Image (cartoon, grey):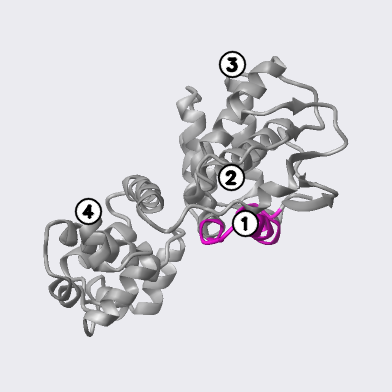
Amino acid sequence: MQDHFSVTARFTQAILEAAQRHGVRVPDDLRQALTHHARVPMAQQDALWSLFANATVDPLAALRAGTDLQAGHLDIVGMLLLSCDTLGDALEVLTEYAPIVGDNARFETQASPGTMLLRYQPEYTVCRDQRVEAALGCVVSLARWMTNGRFHPREVLFMHAPRADVAAYEELLGCPVRFGQPCNGVSMDAAELGHSLIEAGQSLHAHLRRLADDMLASLAQGSVSAQVQQLIRANPRWGKERIGEQLGMSGRNLNRKLAAEAISFKGLREALLYDMAAQALRGGQAVAAVGERLGFSDENAFSRAFRRWSGQTPAQFARSA
């Protein structure tokens, strides 16, 4: 039974956008159902994939959708992956927390001398082949991005038969691909696990800001999160209770409203404060003045927060900018 399974709204939104890019017309009632709650029931996710698979003429549409996925589409799991030191650490995070994204599929690792196999084990049945291709395409693409292009998988394994020429799969994934295998997964040399991940610096935050821009652009103008964003930008010193008061609700109720949009007040506020701080520092404003305007108790508190966000002190960021 699939009734109790669900998928995060952010991941569902990414698949919905991929379907629309391929010219798939998604009925209004299904689109609204897919974006109404923080988690989407599996029956609705199945309906989206069925529509996607039946309406696209490109046999590799699902694989392309997977390789286009970014860390932010995986919600908190994506942020956890980005916070890891090495690719091996990231694989451990993925095997433990992947059910947060979709709780009817999991990853597990299988080590052998000199080799590591990341196995993907889904429990869904609708459009299984397409969804497996999307999942493994995401793994390969994201691992390559997080290691700054240094990740080179040995091969990608699929249990099903190819849906297009094998060479087309290999060109898109950048590695050998084999079909009719005992499991679905990505095989790699054990040495790949030692690759350090990109540091929390300019390249990482450029990526995260693109994700944040996409998220903010997708918000309805009348949504609670859009209103909160406007209030924080105008009053960066205000906390949750004061923001909630302006919207006619308690801080606890504000948290519930934001959770329904798969957003936390703390995460949204810190992302906006970082953006405002970065813009001010690029404009040559003094560190102490920026920290005071954003509501920090002193320059040291601001510097600690900024370093947590960017991996640099405000002074280092200002010099590099």
Mark 3 vs mark 2: in front: 2
Q: CA distance from mark 1 to mark 2?
A: 9 Å
Mark 1 vs mark 4: in front: 4
Mark 4 vs mark 2: in front: 4
Per the image, the residue denoted by label 3 is: 57
Q: CA distance from mark 4 to mark 3?
A: 45 Å
Per the image, the residue denoted by label 2 is: 143
Q: Secondary structure at mark 2?
A: helix
Q: Which mark is residue 171?
A: none
Q: Viewed as shown, does residue 212 lie left or right of 176?
A: left
Q: CA distance from mark 3 to mark 1?
A: 34 Å
Contact check, label 3 and label 2, Cβ < 8 Å: no
Q: CA distance from mark 1 to mark 4?
A: 30 Å
Q: Viewed as shown, does residue 98 lie left or right of 160?
A: left
Q: Residue at x 66, y 45 (%)?
A: 43
Contact check, label 1 and label 2, Cβ < 8 Å: yes
Amino acid found under the numbered disc labelled 3: Val
Per the image, the residue denoted by label 1 is: 90
Q: Secondary structure at mark 4?
A: loop
Q: Is residue 265 visible?
A: no
Nearer the observer, 302 or 47:
302
How many residues crowd around disc 1 within 10 Å: few (fewer than 14), some, or many (20 or more)? many
Query: Of all residues shown, which one is farthest toward the right?
Result: 182
Contact check, label 1 and label 4, Cβ < 8 Å: no
How many residues crowd around disc 3 within 10 Å: few (fewer than 14), some, or many (20 or more)? few
